[in-house]
Image (cartoon, coloured by chain):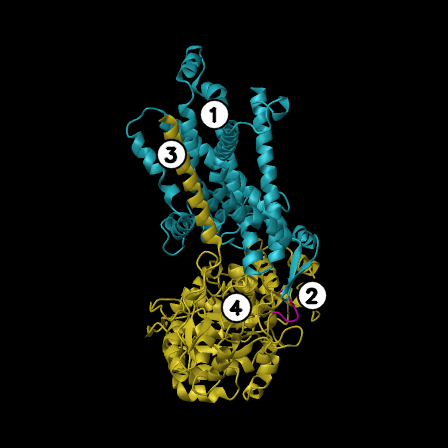
Chain colours: A yellow, B cyan
Amino acid sequence: MCSSRSNIRKLTASFASFAALSVLIAACAPAQPGAPAQPAAPAQVRDFVTWYQYDDKNEDPKSDERVGNEYLRKTIPQFNEAFKDKWRWINQPQPFDKMDTNLVAAVQAGGDVPDLMQAGDGSLIPLLKNGAIQDLTDWIKAQPWFSDLDSSAVAGCTGPDGKIYCVPVAISPQIVFVWKDHFPNGYPKTPEAFKQAAEALKSKGVYAITFFGSTAFDGEGTTRFTNTLIQSFGGGFDDGQGKMKLDRPENVAAIQFLREIIEAGYVHPLSWEGTSTPFVEEEPMKTAEAASFPTGIFGYRYVNPLKAPNGNEYKKGNEEDMLDAITAGDVFIAPFFAPEGKKPGCGIGVTGFVIPTGAKNPDAAKDYINWIMTKEQNPDWVLGPGGGFPALRSMLPEIETRVPVAKAFYEQAAAAVAASQCRPWYGSLERRDEAKKIIQSTVYKLVKEDPTADISATLKAAEEEYNKGS
Amino acid sequence: MRYCGQGRSFAAPARFHAMATQAQATQSAFQVTLRRIQARGFFSHTLPFWLLLPALLVIAAIQFYPGFYSIWLSLQERQGAVWTFVGLRNFERIFDSAAFRESVGHTVVFLVGYVTVTMLASLVIALLLNRVIKFSGVYITLIFVPWVIADVIAGLVFGLLVVPEYGLFSPILSNPSLFPPKGLSITSDPAPRPWIAGFPFPPAPAMYYLILATAWRALPFVTLLILAALKTVPRELIESARIDGASSFQALRLITLPLILPTLVVALFNLTLGGMNGIGLVFTLTRGGPGTATEVLSFLLYIIGFSRLEFGRAAALSVLIAIINLLLILLILRVSRTEERVQ
């Protein structure tokens, strides 16, 4: 009796371990092919998968990406209708600060990659280094719209090897949004004039400026206000040969000026809070607590709703708020100020598309790109996801005609850009992500952590840090 | 059985032949049965191994393989579609980097603060709970609340408490009479000037806050460990000591603490490894800021690997962190063994 019970126990244990092993092996086994597909209809519609930072299914009116979300909601059915016998567009939203990582991981793991991804020139080098994007040189040069592309936009999509890896659709320069009531005589043109106006604003309880001053997003501030300030003082970040060059008199003067306006209380305190609350520096501009906000031209999509110093409210909660405020004259766009004899600085970025390595339907991506580059579609993309000037030079009058409320916006932005010297912040630097973190951390240290530190020595140490890895 | 060669007729009687055949059959059956019994014995002796095998395979897949892959990756650099062997270059770049040295400093400050605060607070709470007091069950339950909240949620909530415009603590923190001269902002105030050049101490207010938040999360587990250990301390020993004139503090120092030392070592292991490798709270509470004031090694690893996509360098840093973890554990073991020998 005892031995039979023991045998039953042993049998049960053996069976249980066998079952567990089987389950494990089955789980690790490759998936069995599904049932054979039904014979294809003559016109088989295939999925065209994109990665945008927008989500067409997110209808939250308070979402940070509401403008892009709405754009996709409107455009996906249009595309599917236009290509109804060929492609079916499926968008897989990705967080904007993780898109590149996710794409590289998907490519290197041999996983599912999208057929097309929205990307900017800032992502080009990391994606290229990791073999995640395709060379589009031959294809793009063969397209009828190629000759209409702005040359700086094409340069932004060109890798160090001279090949073109992305299709530029929008150009985003850095400009300054200004409340008219706080600067009734126009935005100051020199640092001294700025200080005078700022002092007058301070007596009214208004901060003269707010900006992206934190080290959030791995030094993203470098590409915005920091670059605008440094360039305006005639400085820069590189020596033109791929090495970082920070220790120069112009950069020292720019940082010294920044220290002075912070000390004087002209800079809104939320300028430094971005690491704990992303993009919180926009809030003072929305409520006119801050009189000006230097940022990318795409800022109009995010800085809403607005309340002007005179009480006017613009509260649609989308990109039209800023456009309406500019049309009404409550807000204007200006170039940054610069010392006598120098031109205001202005960073410039490019947004567009890349076709990932291993994309299943690159033809779908090319059809989509050609569709976006048409007169019917390009203005909406530029105003929506693009948030800047069209890379296609002939498209600007078309945009102004179709969206009259954008006319004043583009006119002023174009004038601001024309009055500035706009160029990409990175110059010849290749390790751009590392560079922007080093630069922004260094500036932050000099103006917030240790405002008495020697500027030249600290800048020198920072450039040596970067150049060691070259 | 007689052999044919022993004078018997060569043609043995049929019954002897049948007996031989039957004997042979019995022997074969016996041998088969014996082999079956032996096999069953082998199987039953090795049964634990077979039962553990699925778990071992899973551990091999999710721990050993990634570990060895990380070591391989730390010696590579991605160039286009291929990995290129670069030897120890990734390690050199990390050691040369000022960001790494600064991050080590932040990590040391964070670990020392977090471990000290957690151990002390847990010990005090466990000693209090060890007494027979009313509603001790309720207190124990309440103490476990931080443990059931995810790191990410805890980080978000702690962050909301100190947002300058509407944080619950912000009116207190921004009061200049309490925090002269201009009040305190956890999210943006920088660190004071370092006492030793190159070492980030004293830290920024954000680091103190991060230590507090992380200690709050770890408190329940360590309290439970210490409380369980305290329950095993014989009350007679303490009573005898008190009778002999020992004060409460002497009883604690000379009797209780030595007896629960192994548990304290386990708690220390747990806290050290958790502090070195945890990123959830840093990510959601401070994101390494303000500036780089809370950029500990685990966060730097995230930045290099997942923000800059430099996988080779990130793998090298992860190998270094693993080595640091190992050295810390060995140090703790050595110190605890020395303590035990001294006692």
Is A218 located above or below residue B60 in the figure?
Answer: below
Residue B157 or residue A307, whichever sits in front: B157
Q: Tag 4: Cα neighbours inside 10 Å, few (<14), some, or many (≥20)?
A: some
User: Mark 2 or mark 4, which is nearer the start of the sequence?
Assistant: 4
What label does residue A195 carry, if any? 4
Residue denoted by label 1: B260
What label does residue A8 carry, if any? 3
Instruction: Give amino acid for label 2.
Output: Lys
The magenta segment is A426-431
Query: Is residue B52 among the parts visible in the rendering?
Result: yes
Alpha-carbon distance for marks 2 and 3?
A: 75 Å
- Tag 4, which chain? A
Instruction: Give amino acid for label 1.
Output: Ile
Residue B139 or residue A461, whichever sits in front: B139
SS of the residue under disc 1: loop
Tell me if label 3 and label 4 are in contact, CB under 8 Å: no
